[in-house]
């Protein structure tokens, strides 16, 4: 959820003007505030963050609408005895980026978010322990591959929000070698923010970052060079193009929620192409071959066109869009009729029902196709049929970037 908020904030900061043009900005800000209100309430003390409500084992054994649940809702927290660097740092990133969104709308609220973000970053950085280690039960559902990326991501957002040079120093001189993953492109996801951090820090290199020492500017250049390695991986005819691609050209990395990587990659490509365009950077070189910002944009459009229906299945992966889209998504609220009275177990009759979901979850993006470009529209197929807020946030960013041929602001 924190990642969802960070991505939504980033989308609003880069493309709020495009959202506004199609009358969606207020909805985006409203959705963001719903999350940030929750995250602030989940952080009652400097070194306590509530990270989960409910028991995943119990909850997965129930099929009922969340608003009707009567089961126990145990709370899970990270604290100084049981730290969780990733989740605290991602929450810091969410609140720091959101503080920029609310700066012009509600300054008092913006300052509250920033204060929480700064406290959470100190907490995350002071006790460097993976939340998967402190709280092993999360490993089965949202296991972490490491916390280094979240610390850099949070510090990058805190630098944008405060312009405090210590945050920039954290991501450059202090930790670039140990945490930065420089020189190797990785896939952007809720678990790994290296690629997004490299793109976000490229922004400072493209547009200048005020009084930044030469050594740190050189470090920012290294982040940008790593972001370029990734952009070259995305471009289908680049000498270093990734082979993580279906026959029809969709970026495809893993079978679970496969569209997350496609949409995340396209979102980063649109942002990077707009950084190039706005800074009048004409060329991107991939092992000697020259590309333009428009090539990255074309790649991004190819990914979103696939999601919206231009694919071998001739179906849209966005629920409610087009004539063919998933009708049996793995979603309790969508699958249970409004007037049904269900407890924990008897709701499974709706899970097992052969009928399409009675409530269409308009706008939900499902997990996506297999590598062989097939999709099995079954409610029990959570690998392909489950929507997530984090993929939706990435899609909001991607679509907002494509609303108009866009330039971006040089500073948030």
Image (cartoon, rainbow, N blue to C red):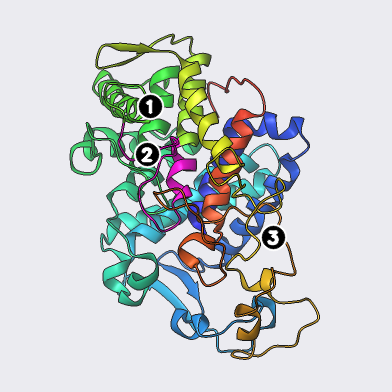
Mark 2 touching mark 1, by CB under 8 A? yes
Residue denoted by label 2: 245
Whether 126 is among the magenta residues is no
Q: Earlier in the sequence, mark 2 or mark 1?
A: 1
Q: Which residue is mark 1?
A: 236
Judged from the image, the secondary structure of the residue bearing numbered disc 1 is loop
Q: Secondary structure at mark 3?
A: loop
Mark 2–mark 3 CB contact (< 8 Å): no
Q: CA distance from mark 2 to mark 1?
A: 9 Å
**Residue to which mark 3 is pinned:** 361
Image spot of residue 374 (x, y percent): 48, 53
Residue 238 point in image, percent of width and height: 32, 21
Q: Which mark is residue 102?
A: none
C-alpha span from label 1 to label 3: 33 Å
Decide which of tag 1 and tag 3 comes sooner along the chain: 1
- How many numbered discs sit on the rendered protein? 3
In this picture, which residue range is highlighted in magenta? Answer: 242-265
Residue in the foreground of this view, choosing between 282 and 157? 282
In the rendered view, tell whether residue 309 sits above or below residue 295: below
Instruction: From the viewer's side, name the closer residue of 392 and 407.
Output: 392
In the image, residue 77 sits, relative to residue 301, either above or below, namely below
Q: Secondary structure at mark 2?
A: loop
Residue 232 point in image, percent of width and height? 33, 25
Q: What crowding class fits label 3: few (fewer than 14 Cα within 10 Å), some (14-19), or many (20 or more)? A: some
The residue lying toward the viewer, choosing from 118 and 131, is: 131
Which residue is drawn at the image coordinates 52% and 61% (left, top)?
A: 376
């Amino acid at each position: 959820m924190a990642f969802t908020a960070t991505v939504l904030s980033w989308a609003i900061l880069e493309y709020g003007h495009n959202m506004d043009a199609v009358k969606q900005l207020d909805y985006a800000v409203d959705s963001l505030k719903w999350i940030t209100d929750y995250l602030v309430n989940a952080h009652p003390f400097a070194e306590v963050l509530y990270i989960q409500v409910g028991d995943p084992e119990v909850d997965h054994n129930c099929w009922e609408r969340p608003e009707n649940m009567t089961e126990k809702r145990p709370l899970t927290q990270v604290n100084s005895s049981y730290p969780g660097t990733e989740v605290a740092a991602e929450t810091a990133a969410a609140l720091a980026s959101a503080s920029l969104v609310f700066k012009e709308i509600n300054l008092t609220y913006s300052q509250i978010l920033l204060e929480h973000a700064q406290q959470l970053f100190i907490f995350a950085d002071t006790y460097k322990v993976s939340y998967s280690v402190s709280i092993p039960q999360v490993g089965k559902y949202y296991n972490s591959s490491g916390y280094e990326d979240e610390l850099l991501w949070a510090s990058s957002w805190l630098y944008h929000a405060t312009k405090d040079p210590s945050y920039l120093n954290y991501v450059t001189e202090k930790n670039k070698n140990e945490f930065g993953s420089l020189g190797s492109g990785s896939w952007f996801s809720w678990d790994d923010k290296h690629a997004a951090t490299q793109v976000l820090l490229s922004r400072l290199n493209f547009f200048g970052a005020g009084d930044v020492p030469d050594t740190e500017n050189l470090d920012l250049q290294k982040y940008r060079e790593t972001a370029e390695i990734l952009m070259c991986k995305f471009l289908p005819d680049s000498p270093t193009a990734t082979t993580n691609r279906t026959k029809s050209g969709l970026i495809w990395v893993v079978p679970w929620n496969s569209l997350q990587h496609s949409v995340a990659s396209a979102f980063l490509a649109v942002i990077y192409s707009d950084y190039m365009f706005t800074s009048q950077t004409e060329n991107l070189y991939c092992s000697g071959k020259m590309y333009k910002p428009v090539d990255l944009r074309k790649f991004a459009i190819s990914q979103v066109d696939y999601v919206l229906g231009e694919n071998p299945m001739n179906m849209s992966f966005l629920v409610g869009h087009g004539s063919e889209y998933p009708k049996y998504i793995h979603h309790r609220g969508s699958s249970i009729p409004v007037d049904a009275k269900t407890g924990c177990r008897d709701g499974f009759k709706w899970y097992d029902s052969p009928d399409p979901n009675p409530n269409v979850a308009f706008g939900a993006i499902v997990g996506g196709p297999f590598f062989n470009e097939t999709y099995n529209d079954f409610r029990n197929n959570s690998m392909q049929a489950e929507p997530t807020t984090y993929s939706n946030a990435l899609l909001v960013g991607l679509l907002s970037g494509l609303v108009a041929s866009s330039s971006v602001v040089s500073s948030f």
